[in-house]
């Protein structure tokens, strides 16, 4: 029985410098009022949110003998994601390390990864086989670039695939065509949707996505999200759960709610409501995983706000 969600992904560790009055110029120093070190965003954060909702998860990732990898192991265990399959066989620091400076206006990042190819790492045959041993049999897998042949194999076995991308200057449908052809769910934001479809109008972008996905979805940052179902386009407004403290990881939390709805077989309206709730909750605390959502609160908020969705 396919009852678990899974991913092969790099582990991210975030160094969060919070409440920085302004970014320093070269040669200058500024102080943050708050600091935290936490697991960062990406598919692993999405799976941790799902684990909190009692969804079994499996993770294949890259961990070394360094201090940051040890921190990641402890945190994954604390979140109930244990054991974790380790694909790494080198002697560098294989986790992604990001320093985030959070100002009143926005967030700025500088990141490092020790994997060959950096953030565009392409898995070799050994990594793909070890990852397959972990992910095989999953109900749903969150995709990342670099593992195309693995996803093709899982898709042929009936696993559903979810694809989420970050902004890139060369973003386009052609670049990710092979992944998009496999994906069952794709969740670009507004900027990514118009770039990848080549349409400047959001309605036209939604129409292009509707040709490729049963329920096309475009997230709208603080305005909620658009989705299309039964031939109609809907706006799901954001669900306010408190002041925004840090938007890091909101997209990963949104995706967790959407996956949870998909795995539990609810309607698209209900699944999108779950996504908005968990995504909105995530921004109320510093870091990707500090704010917690449990089933009881999720269901109560969904009951109260599912009817907020309206035609667009």
Image (cartoon, helix red, strand yellow):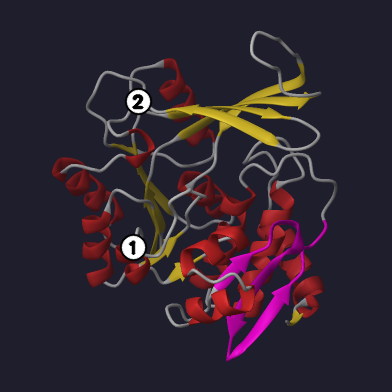
Q: Quadrant of residue 295?
A: bottom right
Element type where label 2 sits in the image: loop
**In the image, 110: left or right of 222?**
left
Q: Is residue 37 visible?
A: yes
Residue 309's x, y, as percent? 75, 78
Q: Where residue 93 is drawn, which disc sits there?
A: none
Viewer-side residue, 7 vs 139: 7
| Image: 48 above or below 212 | above
- Boundaries of the magenta span: 217-240
| Image: 140 above or below 204 | above
Residue 109's x, y, as percent? 59, 31
Other-residue count near label 2 (Cα within 10 Å), few / some / many at <14 / 14–19 / ≥20: some
Q: Which comes sooner in the sequence, label 2 or label 1?
A: 2
Viewer-side residue, 193 vs 200: 200
Q: Where residue 114 is drawn, which disc sits there?
A: 2
**In the image, 35: left or right of 77?**
right
| Image: 190 above or below 24 | below
Residue 143's x, y, as percent? 38, 56
The residue pinned by badge 1 equals: 179
Residue 149's x, y, as percent? 21, 57
Which residue is at 61% across, 45% downward? Answer: 249
Which residue is at 38% across, 68% downward? Answer: 183
């Amino acid at each position: 029985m396919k009852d678990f969600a899974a991913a092969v992904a790099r582990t991210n560790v975030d160094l969060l410098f919070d409440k920085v009055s302004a970014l320093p110029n070269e040669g200058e120093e500024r102080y943050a009022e708050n600091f935290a070190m936490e697991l960062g965003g990406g598919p692993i954060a999405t799976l941790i949110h799902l684990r909190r909702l009692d969804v079994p998860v499996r993770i294949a990732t890259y961990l070394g003998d360094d201090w940051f990898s040890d921190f990641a192991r402890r945190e994954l265990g604390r979140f109930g994601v244990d054991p974790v399959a380790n694909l790494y066989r080198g002697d560098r620091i294989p986790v992604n390390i990001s320093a985030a400076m959070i100002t009143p206006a926005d967030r700025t990042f500088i990141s490092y990864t020790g994997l060959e190819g950096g953030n565009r790492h392409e898995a070799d045959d050994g990594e793909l086989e070890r990852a397959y041993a972990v992910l095989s049999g999953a109900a749903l897998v969150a995709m990342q670039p670099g593992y195309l042949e693995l996803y093709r194999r899982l898709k042929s076995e009936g696993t559903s695939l979810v694809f989420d991308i970050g902004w890139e200057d060369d973003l386009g449908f052609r670049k990710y065509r092979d992944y998009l052809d496999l994906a069952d769910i794709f969740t670009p934001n507004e900027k990514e949707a118009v770039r990848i479809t080549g349409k400047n109008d959001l309605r036209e972008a939604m129409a292009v996505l509707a040709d490729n996905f049963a329920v096309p979805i475009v997230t709208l940052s603080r305005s909620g999200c658009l989705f299309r179902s039964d031939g109609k386009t809907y706006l799901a407004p954001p669900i306010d759960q408190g002041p925004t403290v840090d938007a890091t990881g909101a997209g990963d939390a949104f995706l967790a709610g959407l996956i949870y709805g998909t795995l539990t077989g609810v309607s698209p309206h209900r699944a999108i409501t779950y996504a908005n709730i968990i995504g909105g909750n995530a921004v109320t605390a510093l870091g990707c995983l500090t704010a917690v959502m449990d089933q009881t609160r999720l269901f109560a908020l969904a009951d109260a706000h599912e009817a907020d969705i309206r035609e667009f």
